[in-house]
Image (tube, rainbow, N blue to C red):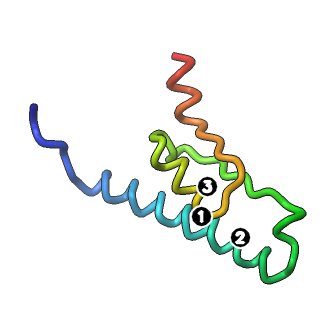
């Protein structure tokens, strides 16, 4: 089995997913500081979460719901 390819595209995908994690975490902490976290839900609608680890990481950072649009599209095909 050949080694997985690592190039600029793969690094770009990781950076974009990390930015999404930071955004979810920032929204969660802002809502906590405002005292509104328990009255709201954070929905992460993303094309980047195509593995279970991605979805669970988003939940760990504060998302209540993860909508993996790309995974839904691939499942329909």
- Element under disc 2: helix
Q: Is residue 24 left or right of residue 39?
A: left
Mark 1 Cα-neighbour bin, 10 Å: few <14, some 14–19, many ≥20:
some
N-terminal of the pair, mark 2 or mark 3, is 2
* 26 w.r.t. 12: above or below: below
- Element under disc 3: helix
Mark 2 Cα-neighbour bin, 10 Å: few <14, some 14–19, many ≥20:
many
Q: Is residue 31 left or right of residue 76?
A: right
Q: Is residue 33 left or right of residue 4?
A: right
Q: Which residue is mark 1?
A: 61
Figure label count: 3
N-terminal of the pair, mark 1 or mark 2, is 2
Q: Which residue is mark 2?
A: 28
Which circle marks residue 48 in the picture?
A: none
Q: Which residue is mark 3?
A: 59
User: Is label 1 in contact with label 3 (beta carbons under 8 Å)?
Assistant: yes
Q: Where residue 53 sits: x, y (%)?
A: 45, 47
Name the one closer to the observer, 18 or 55.
Answer: 55
Residue in view at x 50 percent, y 47 percent? 48
């Amino acid at each position: 089995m050949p080694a997985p390819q690592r190039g600029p595209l793969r690094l770009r995908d990781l950076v974009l997913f990390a930015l999404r994690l930071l955004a979810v975490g920032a929204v969660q902490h802002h809502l906590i500081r405002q005292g509104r976290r328990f009255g709201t839900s954070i929905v992460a609608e993303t094309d980047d979460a195509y593995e279970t680890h991605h979805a669970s990481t988003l939940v760990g950072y504060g998302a209540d719901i993860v909508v993996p649009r790309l995974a839904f599209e691939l499942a329909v095909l």
